[in-house]
Amino acid sequence: MLSFATEFPVSATATSGKFLAAVREWLLGSPHTVFKSSDFPLVDVQEEWSAKKSNEQIEVLRFDSTTSSAAAVRYTKIDDGLEWVSTVVFLQSSPAGWIGIRTSCESQHPSVRLPAARKPVFVRTFLNRLSGGLDGELTASASARILANSEVPLAARCLTGQTGCRLPVVYVSAKFQGGHSVNPTSLADALAGMAHVVVEPNRPFSVRLMQEVKSENIYGGAVGIYWPDGAGRRSFFPKQQFESSAELEHAVVDEVRLALVNRRPLARTTWASVQEQISRRKFAELRAAGSTAVEEYVQNFDKEAKAKQQELEDAELEISRLQAEIRRYQSQRPMQSGLSLQAAPEKDLFAGEILGIVHDALTDTIARVTNDSRRQHVLKRLVAANPPSGEAGAIRSRLKTLLRDYKSMDAKVKAGLQEIGFDIADDGKHIKIIFQGDDRYMFAMPKSGSDVRGGLNLAGDISRLLL
């Protein structure tokens, strides 16, 4: 069973020799291999080479010409009833190089359970040794791409699949109060070689991006996966659905890994592709020499035919996987008509705001319709299936605490209001506070409070109009 697959660009300076040196470093650096440095001179391999020792086998292909350079390594190991096969392919053809990786695990006995899939450690080895290359407008890297305030157009292209990338873009939005729901550094490291991690800098950036993409962007701390040129479905991860940043990160990484496994590989980064290039060169050499060695000619013809057959079998396997994926998602989709609620051009001003408004409206309506009627049954089901996030209640409580004994806009009150999402302007007779930068929700506060209940009354007025 295929457990991991990806392709990513590497530096234009990478060569087949450097690639094979990185493979050698990876294999010899493993504490689990029986191979020693004297067992295989990978860097000096020409065309085809293989070695077998104990329960491990290494097969190598290499092709170099004046216009391109390619190499492929297949490492097989049998361990505790499991057969692990890792195939790594390198191609350098102007103007960029690419690495293709596919790892599979098969049980030799029905009773053996397959281990949980995870990213191979050698992905990082290749990124370190060969350096990530340019993938459209983004560079393959183990670091997150933190957007500048001026890069709204780039963010829009990332979300609409117009960056020319092969890898998906994992977009991390800013929370309403600033910061992010997941650690961008940790997430980028976990997704190195699998996806680009793009991070928006702040909430105002998200508001401007909304205008660029017609409200199709994620926001408020959510994380989204966007595929280039519509090559895969979009996946969104609202922060309130996860108990911790680590849980959210794990969900995103697992979603990307699963999608890549079910994605058809680039034809040029497969074992069959390198084998075909070697066979074609041998054909050309035989023809140029006027060779009468029919048997050698036939053998090389058979290898090319076998490479083509392998490509067809790989394609059929990918088609079968994709068909199974489609059937799985179709089975999850309800047969009856769904409910689509278009909230645009309004957007949540805090997490779960619009859902909470709809929930409250439905709850209020339940008491107004005929008891035990179809309408009441549907409304009750909708309310039960869409519980509010509780964020509105938390903001309301926080406001009351901050303004209960309000006397002036001291540092504590100011920091608390900003944490909730208020912008504060102190340039007139009164202090103005604006919620999430929306001028429709601007409130005036006295610079000094004399009324004992003035602060609580203000908190109540804000809550009634806003929450």
Image (tube, rainbow, N blue to C red):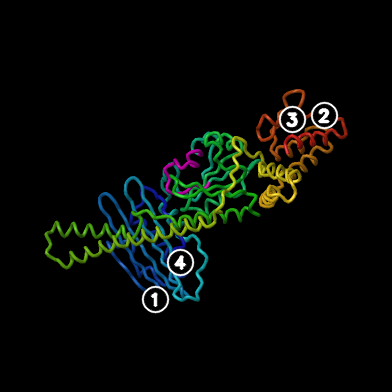
Picture quadrant where residue 426 is located: top right
At label 2, the amino acid type is Ser
Dot placed on the residue nearer the N-terminal end, 1 or 2: 1
At label 1, the amino acid type is Ser
Q: Which mark is residue 261?
A: none
Q: Position of residue 180 (x, y in %)?
A: 61, 45
Left or right placement of residue 133 versus residue 275 in this view: right
Rounded to the nearest angstrom, the CA distance separating label 1 from label 2 is 83 Å
Q: Position of residue 232 (x, y in %)?
A: 46, 50
At label 4, the amino acid type is Ser
Report the magenta residues as a range.
Answer: 155-170
Point 16% across, 68% down: residue: 295
Left or right placement of residue 455 versus residue 28 in this view: right
Q: How busy is the neighbourhood of tag 4: few (under 14 within 10 Å), some, or many (20 plus)?
A: few
Q: Nearer the viewer, mark 1 or mark 4?
A: 1
Dot placed on the residue nearer the N-terminal end, 2 or 3: 3
State the SS at label 2.
Answer: loop
* Quarter containing the C terminus: top right
Label 2 belongs to which residue? 448
Residue 215 covered by magenta stretch: no
Dot placed on the residue nearer the N-terminal end, 1 or 4: 4
At label 3, the amino acid type is Phe
Label 4 belongs to which residue? 30
